Image (cartoon, rainbow, N blue to C red):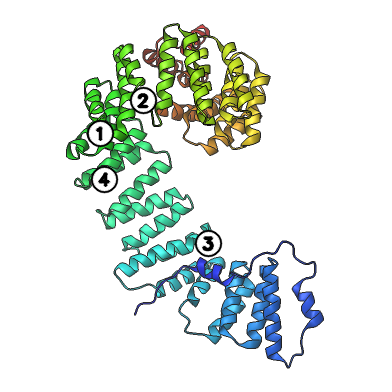
Amino acid sequence: MPRRLVFLLPLLTAACATVTPAPAPEPQTPEAKVIQREPAAEDLRGASFYYLIIGELAGQRGQLTDAGRMYLESARLSRDPRVAERATRIALFARDQKTAGHALALWSELEPEHAERWQADMLLSIRAGRDADAARLIDQHFPAQGETRETAWRQIVSLLAQEGPGAMPAMHALTQRHANEGEAWFALARLALQFKQFDTAESALNKVLRLEPRRKDAWILLAGTYFSTGRIDAGLNQVKAMVEQFPKDQDLRLNYARALIEARRYDEARPLFAELLRKNPEDMDLRYTVALLALDGKDLGTAERELRALLKVPERADAAAYYLGRLEEQRGNERAARDWYERVHEGELRLDAMIRLATLSARHGRMDEARAQLAKARADIEVPEERVRLFLAEAGLLKDADSPEAALKLLDEALIAHPGDPDLLYTRALLADQLDRFPEAEADLRAILAQDPNHPEALNALGFTLAQRNIRLDEALELIDKALKLSPENPAILDSMGWVLFRQGKFGEAEPFLRKAYAREPDGEIAAHLAEVLNALGRRDEAFKLLDDALAREPGRGELLETQKRLRQQP
């Protein structure tokens, strides 16, 4: 019968089940107590029991190193393999390598055939840097073949993951011993991903696919590695190749279509979803997605057909009515749009429908009516988060109507009703900054950070505001850097990082951040910042071409026009 691999962490946890810290240890150490009260040497049984009790008490005080040493003393006197095993596991848990080594040697002497002792030996080898020895020990306890061998590789990954990145050399050594086995490279990739060693994972997965070209889990993991490192196009190409490799796998095709949506590649996603819907006409989730993609692509005929079909599905009727309202807005038929919005009574889009109704009123100059609609909606709603959202919607309408002072006053009232709400504070800060009331903006952003020091949007907004004013640039860089670590793919934060580096005169360092931001979101403001950097690098023609292209997409955009005018005036 093959020997089974088992996880070490549960064993260590079980070994220390009663070794839990007490509120405060006594000042006197267990060793001092032993010196004062050690029993007579001839009473081995009593001495062994004494050390056992002292070890247990030390563990309860959280003194795990002392506990392991006391258990080892007890095992030496009693010659009990169970106590030696417990001493080994406690010492390993405490990372007391010397005690663990002595305890393991005693355990090996007392119980040479114990099936699980090799795991402790392996951990000690890893911690001592004897990676080849660790790999050899693992290898000796592998089942020969079949499903049990695949399970064994998974267990090894789980076991070594508990040791941290220091276990990677042993995993490399083990993989080299099985270099012709795809499962070995797959295990290496999984462990590397645990520690975010993406280059190692990618290399290992490519070796898996050379050995086993149709191994689907390796294809998926490799695509995930690309996505995790921000290589969106490479990830999508990998998934596309998987779809071609496994053409009958509809789940894979669906995941590819969803990944395209995540990457905002809607034109490529639409035909995939349409094909999936043809094959699965009863799938209402697919129908809903096809409808929204058609609406986004201005294929209003397809969108209307699918949304009207969804009206017949009770759990989708409110959402279908809401999006039929959006569809009629695109057609310019606002009366029909109102009729649809008024049919939305339940669900997560109910509030959106209320806000759209108010927006239609404001669009035609009926701001008092719009504000009254939102005020009535707030009065009828008890959920604080929904009331906050309605305040924010009203403030947005006022801002769009060139009434930022009125919007600011409304937000003051909202914060009286909802003190400290981060969304209200954030919106008020942006408005105050727009009105050149920087101290008020900074106060609100710092109030958010006092509640949540890791709020990426507030960190970014404060850092960008400082950079925009060209003041306290070192602090701005620190704030934006922290925001970027929290949200590394956020185009607004990438833009801020590029802009603060530009302000510091680090033009070469600024360009990659702005290019990455612009690739993710081709926004006019980001284009203006990138053009500034290109101009500063002496690449004026490239800067003006970028501005022209951006203005073709967003004609009349203020930041673009202002930047273009100013750069043309420079010699």
Q: How many marks?
A: 4
Q: CA distance from mark 2 to mark 4?
A: 32 Å
Above or below, 428 against 69 in this view is above
Q: Is residue 46 left or right of residue 331?
A: right
Q: Which is closer to the viewer, label 1 or label 4?
A: 1
**Which residue position is annotated with label 3?**
163
Query: Within 10 Å of the Cα at label 4, are there few (<14), some (14-19), or many (20+) other Cα atoms?
Result: few
Q: Which is closer to the viewer, label 3 or label 2?
A: 2
**Which residue position is annotated with label 4?**
251
Q: CA distance from mark 2 to mark 1?
A: 19 Å
**Which residue position is annotated with label 1?**
287
Instruction: Assign a secondary structure to mark 4.
Output: helix
Q: Which badge, 1 or 4, is on the more N-terminal residue?
A: 4
Above or below, 343 against 59 in this view is above
Q: Which residue occupies the extreme right position in the image?
A: 36
Q: Which is closer to the viewer, label 2 or label 4?
A: 2
Q: Amino acid at mark 2?
A: Val
Q: Which one is in front, 374 or 172?
A: 374
Q: Amino acid at mark 3?
A: Glu
Query: Within 10 Å of the Cα at label 2, are there few (<14), some (14-19), or many (20+) other Cα atoms?
Result: many
**Which residue position is annotated with label 2?**
344
Is residue 262 something that shows in the picture? yes
Q: Is residue 560 left or right of residue 497?
A: left
Q: CA distance from mark 3 to mark 4?
A: 35 Å
Q: Tell me which residue sits at (42%, 38%) in the image.
A: 230
Q: Position of residue 473 (x, y in %)?
A: 64, 26
Q: Which badge, 3 or 4, is on the more N-terminal residue?
A: 3
Q: Which residue occupies the extreme bottom position in the image?
A: 42
